[in-house]
Amino acid sequence: MHLILSFPFHQFKNKQKIQGAKKTSRKKESSRLDTEREREREIEMGMREEMEQKEEGVMATDFFWSYTDEPHASRRRQILSQYPQIKELFGPDPWAFFKITVVVSLQLWTATLLHDAGWLKMLAIAYFFGSFLNHNLFLAIHELSHNLAFSTPVYNRCLGIFANLPVGVPMSVTFQKYHLEHHRFQGVDGIDMDIPSRAETLLVTNVVAKSIWVILQLFFYALRPLFIKPKPPGYWEFINFSIQIALDAAVVYFWGWRSLAYLILSTFVGGGMHPMAGHFISEHYVFKPEQETYSYYGPLNFLTWHVGYHNEHHDFPRIPGSKLHKVKDIAPEYYEGLESYKSWSQVIYMYLMDRTVGPFSRMKRKVPGTAKKSE
């Protein structure tokens, strides 16, 4: 009886708890490994299907589905752990205000000169000159959406409204709302509005439809969020709208409809079948199944706030475009192995002529739990 009473039951129970915890941990680890293997099999199957479709010359009938997180956050951590000096590149571009002011002034002045120009002359100047200026301003607004002109966000927003003026249509404030989600939830179904809608995938199925889509892609880019994921307008959008309409009305009142038409035409042609607009396709359209973001290293970067350094931009959105080339210089091993482009015009041609590439040529992923909570 004494032996039974002196038996260390508490130690035995603790040992059982530890063994039970180990079994539970092993089960969880096994389940996690099984899930990862299943994901790897699904990825391999998807890539195999894509390769078969490419060999057959058939356009994809579904998006590329990824079962991992977007690649930029993890690469950012790796690069910063190895090259912490990259943090010194963070912060505003001190020349941003000056550059934007010059382009806005030049484009508005050009519009006043064309108040009585013929339509053919206006179209030619809009395509070969005005389109470069307005697309530059569109990408300046992109830069400002990351607060890369001033340290104070409200100053960037005001400058964005100013940069918006020659574009002709109010968009700078709304653009920021959706663009930041594109970075935070890259490729996430129903959140990233950079990805073509289901309607676009059904309509754009051949080279003719793709050509029309490229010409009108700025409309799709602008209207897609309003139909799929509309956000209620706020105070700043009202300010953006009011100032833009006031400017448009002033242009018409003092110089006539042709001056305003030149501004809007410059925006439209610059966002369609135009070398500058090649970045819309080059940035994330998947031409190589295992890569979802692509950089462009060509001369048009100097006119587009270096948005071509797109892998570098997504890795470090707090670095202004003028310094993104330094990221590649500091950490070349992270970028030199990635597929990149040297011509945006070539990218447009590839998109049109490759029968296997279309609106479905984008990487998608399911909605993460954090996104559901934030919504």
Image (spheres, rainbow, N blue to C red):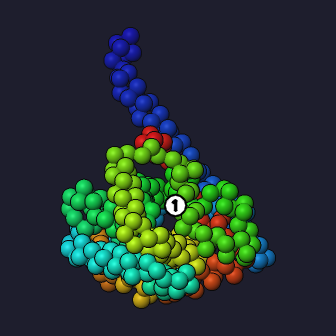
What residue is rendered at 25% in x and 68% in y? 149
Q: Nearer the viewer, residue 304 or 5?
A: 304
Q: Residue furthest top?
A: 1
Task: Give x and y (percent) for residue 304.
Answer: 39, 78
Q: What residue type is labelled 1?
A: Ala
Residue in view at x 55 percent, y 81 percent: 119
Q: Where is residue 361 in the image (x, y as percent from the top left)?
A: 63, 68
Asked whether the viewer can see residue 169, the reply is yes
Looking at the image, residue 24 lies above or below residue 73: above
Q: Quadrant of the N terminus?
A: top left
Q: In which quarter of the image is the C terminus?
A: top left
In the visual, does 268 lie left or right of 311? right
Question: Does residue 217 appear left or right of residue 108 in this picture?
Answer: right
Decide which of 201, 127 is in the foreground and name it.
Answer: 127
State the image coordinates of residue 156 (x, y, percent, origin top left): 27, 61
Q: Where is residue 265 in the image (x, y as percent from the top left)?
A: 51, 74
Is residue 371 depicted above or below 218 in this figure?
A: above
Q: Name the residue under label 1.
A: 222
Does 152 appear above or below 6? below
